[in-house]
Amino acid sequence: MLSTYFFLLLLATLAAAADLYKVLGLHKSASDKDIRHAYKKLSKKYHPDKNKEPGAEEKFVEIAQAYEVLSDPTKRQIYDQYGEEGLKAHEGGQHHANPFDMFQSFFGGGFQRQTRRGPSSVSEFEVQLADVYTGASIDFMVKKRILCDHCRGSGAASDGDIHTCTTCGGSGVRLVKQQIFPGMFAQSQATCGDCGGHGKVIKRKCPHCGGQKVVDHTAHFTLEVTPGMPEGHEVVFEGEADESPDWEAGDVVLRVRTRKDKGGWRRKESSLYWKETIGIEEALLGFERNLTHLDGHIVGLVRTGVTQPGFVQTIKGEGMPIFGREAFGDLFVEYNVVLPIEISSETRRKLAEAFQTSRSSHDEL
Ligand SMILES: [Zn+2]
Ligand SMILES: [Zn+2]
């Protein structure tokens, strides 16, 4: 394990030129909180205990190194001013922290310790069929609770306002003595009522959140609809659900659904369905029509000869994009034939003549 680690470290150092901010997906102006947040998210994502994809471990080491520098104000300043070279000169060949130890100290025990997870929110999200056809970025807002940044989730006006509960001595529990028979007692534990089991009481509440520890917040997100996204596909915004000091925030999950298309298009997986209405003359003699597709491009509908009512024409490659592939499904056009409400006597005479002729020519055969 140790040797692999050093080997990887070497690899990562050789490939080091990558911008440390980019490694964490951040801009140079990122706040300490942004840096912590990015490290928290990415180090979990690429931790080799969890992520078995090739390259995950290298990425994990890279993330740890970026965090090590950017979370240290002195190192960050040197890096901002003099870059990678300046940092090397400053460290003078000093060893990097072990990325796994760093992860452990950040999360307090890595994956072994069960951090309580807050509830995830799952909601249905309707998108236009045209957006699923072309792909789209859709902005939306979510109301959620975030940790109060004034008290950083403690609920107290200042750190000096947090005191150990005197009732339970900080244990959060209280021993309750109950008399069962005269002279016989049973002891049981109960949650301390004065501190609610937290072991701490707050003298002065935080004025910003009123001691609630969290505040309401409207968060903005962008849903990336990829072309051909399957019906009911779930897009996960990791760790973006309600925050609380008691848990690690759950996820916001969107289940993407297609809104019923008013234009008459229907989709089933990678197939598209369209109903086209034609006249009797077109049904008998053939026709050329233009169908405007979901993204506005024109599909030529061409029929020579007779088209029966209900006939379905298959047009290859004009269906929905196939999710994750550079290919398209097929389009199925069903033809409806409408008859005129009435016909002029002239038309009637000609038709009679035409049908008569065809019938007699038939008879001759
Ligand atoms: Zn207490
Ligand atoms: Zn507060």
Image (tube, helix red, strand yellow):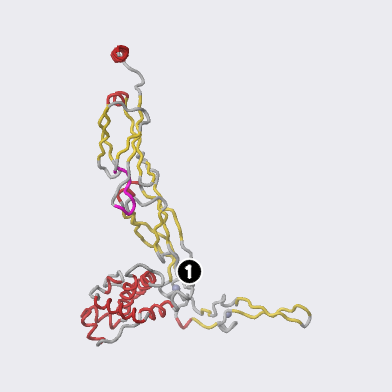
Residue toward you, 162 or 249 = 249
Question: Which contiguous range is marked in magenta?
Answer: 317-325
Q: Residue furthest right?
A: 182
Q: Position of residue 159 (x, y in %)?
A: 45, 81
Ligand 2, image quadrant it occupies: bottom left
Image quadrant occupied by the C terminus: top left
Check the image and report above or below for 30 versus 325: below
Q: Is mark 1 within 8 Å of ligand 2?
A: no
Taking the magenta stretch, the answer to whether it contains residue 320 is yes
Image quadrant occupied by the N terminus: bottom left
Q: Quadrant of residue 17?
A: bottom left
Q: Residue furthest front?
A: 365
Residue toward you, 93 or 178 = 93
Q: How many marks?
A: 1
Check the image and report above or below for 77 versus 121: below
Check the image and report above or below for 106 versus 288: below
Taking the magenta stretch, the answer to whether it contains residue 323 is yes
177 left or right of 261 in image: right
Q: Quadrant of residue 313?
A: top left
Residue toward you, 156 or 227 = 227
| Residue 349 visible in the snapshot | no
Q: Position of residue 133 (x, y in %)?
A: 32, 48
Q: Secondary structure at mark 1?
A: loop
| Residue at 35 percent of width and 23 percent of height | 339
Q: Quadrant of residue 281?
A: top left
Q: Position of residue 112 (x, y in %)?
A: 47, 75
Pointer 1 residue? 117
| Residue 279 visible in the snapshot | yes
